[in-house]
Image (spheres, rainbow, N blue to C red):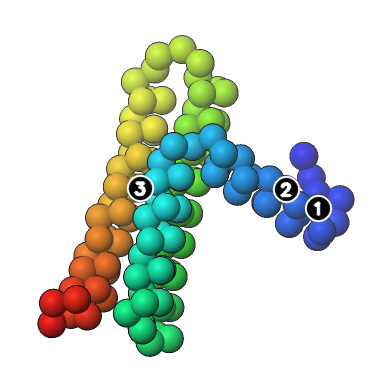
Amino acid sequence: MKAKNLRYSFIYAQQGIWYAVRTQRNMKIHLATAAMAAAFAWILGFSAIEFAILTVTIAAVLIAEMINSALEAVVDLVSPDVNPLAKLAKDMAAGAVLISALASLIVGYLLFWPRLFG
């Protein structure tokens, strides 16, 4: 499906985001965690640079989760039966999300720990 114009490209992208938020449990978890982190950052008076780092980190996790969900949908479409390569693709995509989430924990520690306990 090709977008008729730039406006439709944004509409389709928005539909993809809303679908992920509505249907993907982990996306809801990531968004809730991101909202809490942003709220605490605001309360703790993060600088613009610290907010930028936090925002990029949050975006990386959300992007990884959406790419993982999209890849899982495509794999299910082309390989509805159990297939070791389909499992491998899904596991590696989930692993990418895990790496992104673990990296976000490290960034969160580096940003929040000194404000809370330093």
User: Is residue 53 at all visible to an observer of this figure?
Assistant: no
Is there any visible trace of residue 49 in the rendered image? yes
Q: Amino acid at mark 1?
A: Tyr
In-front residue for pair 88/17: 17
Q: Residues within 10 Å of mark 3 (few under 14, many from 20)?
A: many
Three-letter amino acid code of the residue under disc 2: Tyr
Q: Cα distance, mark 3 to mark 1?
A: 28 Å
Q: Which residue is mark 1?
A: 8
Where residue 16 sits: x, y (%)?
63, 45
Which mark, by number, is residue 12? 2
Q: Is residue 65 left or right of residue 114?
A: right
Q: Tag 2: Cα neighbours inside 10 Å, few (<14), some, or many (≥20)? A: some
Q: Which quadrant of the figure contains the C terminus?
A: bottom left
Image check: 21 left or right of 65? right
Q: Secondary structure at mark 2?
A: helix
The secondary structure type at the circle numbered 3 is: helix
The residue that mark 3 highlights is 97
